[in-house]
Image (spheres, rainbow, N blue to C red):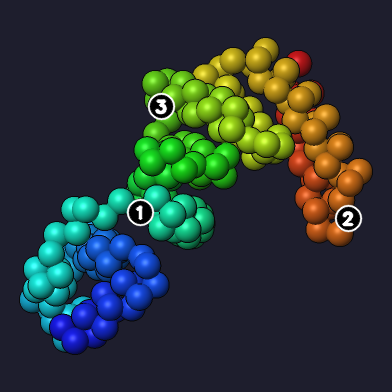
């Protein structure tokens, strides 16, 4: 493993990349297994001696390659969505927050974070925070993110803010109608289903 790690470091140098990226990657792998699977580093047959490998490589504290972070940002979002769909809400929230904290978040990261938060908590404070996150997500979205509008409706209903919810429902339906007009196939079918759901909800809240 030591030789393999050295080859990887040499390749990174040859490619004019920060060799500390290997330390960063191995650290993430180790932390993931420690967090998700209570991995014991003594289990060398399964995971290799990551602590020893990291000790050989150094701590990697000088690694600050913004280009690398941007490349990995899309992977982080994908992993967050996978965790969300697998109902691993804490992991999804952690990855979404990571994107936000490094100023690399997209509106999709806010969708993941809001959905995860709403699954994990239904307090007034948590729902109010979700509304704040939704507005932050809307502010950085180049085009309206329909899912943010739907989550806003759900959060407002949790807070018994029916009047505001009906306003957002009307916005949501208008956006869905435009989307449907420009779509076909499954996208158009989905938009139609959402319009029906929103209209039904609107009638209930009036």
Considering the image in quadrants, where does the C terminus appear?
top right
Q: Which residue is mark 3?
A: 126
On the rendered structure, is 175 left or right of 4?
right
Query: Closer to the N terminus: mark 2 or mark 1?
Result: 1
Q: Mark 2 and 1 residues: CB-CB less than 8 Å, in contact?
A: no
Q: Position of residue 139 (x, y in %)?
A: 59, 27
Residue 33: image tag: none
| Callout 2: SS | loop
Q: Mark 1 and 3 residues: CB-CB less than 8 Å, in contact?
A: no
Identity of the residue drawn at 83% across and 42% down: 179
Residue 184: image tag: 2
C-alpha span from label 2 to label 1: 41 Å
Q: Which residue is mark 1?
A: 65
Considering the image in quadrants, where does the N terminus appear?
bottom left
Q: Nearer the viewer, mark 3 or mark 2?
A: 2
Q: Is residue 38 above or below residue 157?
A: below
Residue reaching furthest to the top? 163
Question: For residue 103, which quarter of the picture?
Answer: top left
Q: Mark 3 and 2 residues: CB-CB less than 8 Å, in contact?
A: no
Q: Is residue 157 above or below residue 18?
A: above
Identity of the residue drawn at 59% across and 15% down: 161
Estimate how packed mark 3 is, as few (under 14), some (14 to 19) or many (20 or more) residues with alpha carbons within 10 Å.
some
From the viewer's side, name the closer residue of 156 and 24.
24
Identity of the residue drawn at 88% across and 55% down: 184
C-alpha span from label 3 to label 2: 37 Å
Query: Closer to the N terminus: mark 1 or mark 3?
Result: 1
| Callout 1: SS | loop
| Callout 3: SS | helix
Question: For residue 99, which quarter of the picture?
Answer: top left
């Amino acid at each position: 493993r030591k030789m393999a790690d050295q080859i990887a470091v040499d390749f990174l140098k040859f490619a004019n990349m920060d060799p500390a990226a290997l330390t960063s990657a191995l650290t993430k792998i180790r932390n993931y297994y420690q967090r998700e699977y209570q991995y014991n580093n003594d289990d060398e047959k399964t995971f290799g001696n990551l602590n020893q490998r990291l000790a050989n490589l150094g701590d990697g504290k000088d690694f600050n390659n913004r280009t690398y972070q941007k490349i990995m940002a899309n992977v982080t979002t994908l992993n967050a969505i996978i965790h969300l769909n697998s109902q691993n809400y804490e992991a999804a929230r952690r990855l979404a927050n990571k994107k936000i904290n490094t100023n690399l978040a997209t509106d999709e990261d806010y969708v993941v974070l809001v959905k995860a938060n709403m699954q994990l908590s239904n307090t007034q404070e948590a729902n109010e925070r979700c509304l704040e996150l939704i507005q932050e997500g809307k502010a950085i979205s180049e085009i309206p993110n329909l899912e943010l509008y739907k989550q806003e409706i759900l959060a407002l209903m949790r807070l018994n803010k029916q009047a505001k919810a009906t306003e957002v429902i009307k916005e949501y339906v208008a956006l869905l109608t435009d989307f449907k007009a420009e779509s076909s196939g499954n996208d158009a079918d989905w938009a139609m289903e959402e319009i029906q759901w929103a209209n039904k909800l609107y009638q209930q809240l009036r």
